[in-house]
Image (cartoon, coloured by chain):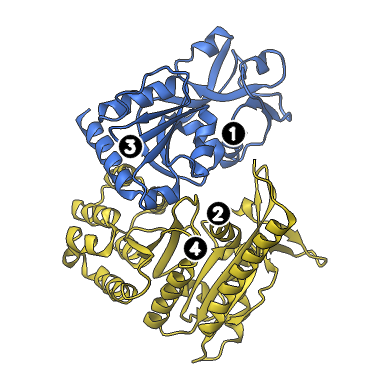
Amino acid sequence: MATYGLQDTLARQRKKYDTLMRLEHQAVAAGYVLFDPDFFEPYDRYHAIHGRLPHRDVVKVISPTGDLLVLRPDVTTSLSRQVIPAWQAGEELKVFYRTSVFHQKVGRGIVVTRQFGLEWFGGAEQEADHEMLHLAQALLADLNGEALLEIGDTAFLDAWLKEAALDETTHVLLLEALEDKNRRACLNILKAAAVETSMQDVLMRLFDGQGAFTELETTLDPDLLPPSMQPAWQRLKALETVLAKGDAMTRRVYDLAMVSPQNYYDGLIFKAYLEGVAVPVLRGGRYHPLTRRFGREIPAIGLSIDLDTWLEAVMRDA
Amino acid sequence: MRETRLIVALPKGRLGEDALATLRTIGYAQNIPDKTRRLIMQDADHDVTYLFVKPVDVITYVEQGVADVGIIGLDSLLEADADVYTLADLGFGQCRFAVAGPLKKTGSAPGKTWRIATKYPRVTAQYYAKTNRTVEIIKLNGSVELAPLVGLSDAIVDIVETGSTLKANGLEIYEEMFALSARLIANRASYRLKYPLFKALLQKLDAEREDA
């Protein structure tokens, strides 16, 4: 068994520190400013925003005045609550954070997750989408091993669901089956709900639309997607053109039926994986609907990194 | 270098044997015997490694990314609340969750909270919460049928296949809960990183079920 001396320990700590500094330097170089989000949020507001998340996972706190609060389960909501009410029309705000979020897990008590993230409020949509994914690719280049960026757009499923007008139970069941990547369950739900065959075909084409962009262009026949989905397809096409000019180390795959457990994402949505790491190392997306719930709708996009997973990936060959 | 190997966690015991039988119908695991003392075996034809683990541990191996894919009963999956994809219902291992207890006793005395012994406290709590019923749950690790017979509980929640174990112990079903069967689960990162391997496996399983 290998043993480590003090110098080895210090060297590993130094490498971790350097990694964190590189993340922050890349954020600062791209024009992002450090922001410190609040620790607590009113429970009622959090519950209203995060409909599909399991609320037993949230750490609840009673304030001295008897109000029920949650201990910051995610940074995006905290930031939005602080930023949106003070927003002036036409403003842009690019912020980054390095902080912790808190969850309650059965058998594990309160779990603290350290996060690093970037958020851009008020940026022009296409420009912000491209920059955020460019930054994601640049950050991923710091990891040992080939990273894979999974990109989707909620507009495909939103358009389909709007046209299908399913009842609430079927809607929820279908989203669960899509989230589980369970193709047969999706088909069974569509058949049980007597959804028109042509609509079933469209959804299954979205489901099967997983792969490199060039593969989708040939296998999906995007011209045959409904007109309501064409803007989303064109957005992804423009994005792929820009990203293809960037870092060649990161593979990109697209998933047209991607579902996020965070119900506030609307539009671009993404995750990154690394060979040999069991969970996503980076995730993010566009979240206009969340800002709307804080008083006004402004363009907003962000990404976050689970720092413990990230550092583990950086250190695995150290 | 892109990983071309798939690691599959299979439960030891009957569910594992049924899983192997299903995999054989689509050409996988031809060289893997039903019963073996080896914990790890290789199917070189498909570059698949099989891990043989306790049924409840299948989820842990998959969730932690040690195995890419696993086959597990829905009962264990629901109890674990794991962060994995549930890619398919494999159709075998059919049984059901049920509330059962001593013959001719279908409830507790008025005003007394019903005590339920079970290996599945999470499933039980959710089931009763959905119907706004309050029960006291007693977690056991096995032989739950004993609990109501010796006064530890009023009833049990357990999986029932034929009902013969219940009958042998003088118990009857009070309430059918829902049906169960084996599920194919996947680690979320593995699914994305090895998507072509998953796609090939799922297409073969789907084609086999269409034919059946």
The answer to whether residue A106 is seen in the rendering is: yes
Q: Which chain is blue?
A: B
Q: In terms of image quadrants, where is residue A59?
A: bottom right
Q: Earlier in the sequence, mark 3 or mark 1?
A: 3
Q: Which residue is mark 3?
A: B47
Q: Secondary structure at mark 1?
A: helix
Q: Is residue A150 shown above or below B1?
A: below
Q: Could you say where residue B5 lies in the image, as x and y percent from the top left?
A: 36, 41
Q: Secondary structure at mark 3?
A: loop
Q: Which residue is mark 4?
A: A143
Q: Horizontal placement of B176 versus B133: left or right?
A: left
Q: Are marks 4 and 2 on the same chain?
A: yes
* Chain where mark 3 sits: B
Q: Which chain is yellow?
A: A
Q: Is residue B14 shown above or below A171?
A: above
State which quarter of the image contains the N terminus of chain A: top right
Identity of the residue furthest to the right in this view:
A64
CA–CA distance between discs 4 and 3? 27 Å
Q: Nearer the viewer, mark 1 or mark 2?
A: 2
Q: Horizontal placement of A205 versus A312: left or right?
A: left
What type is the residue that disc 1 sits on? Thr
What type is the residue that disc 3 sits on? Asp
Q: Secondary structure at mark 2?
A: loop
Q: Nearer the viewer, mark 2 or mark 3?
A: 2
Q: Is residue B104 shown above or below A174?
A: above
Q: Nearer the viewer, mark 4 or mark 1?
A: 4
Q: Could you say where residue A272 lies in the image, as x and y percent from the top left?
A: 44, 61
Q: How many marks?
A: 4
Q: Are marks 2 and 3 on the same chain?
A: no
Q: Which residue is mark 1?
A: B124
Q: Which residue is mark 2?
A: A316
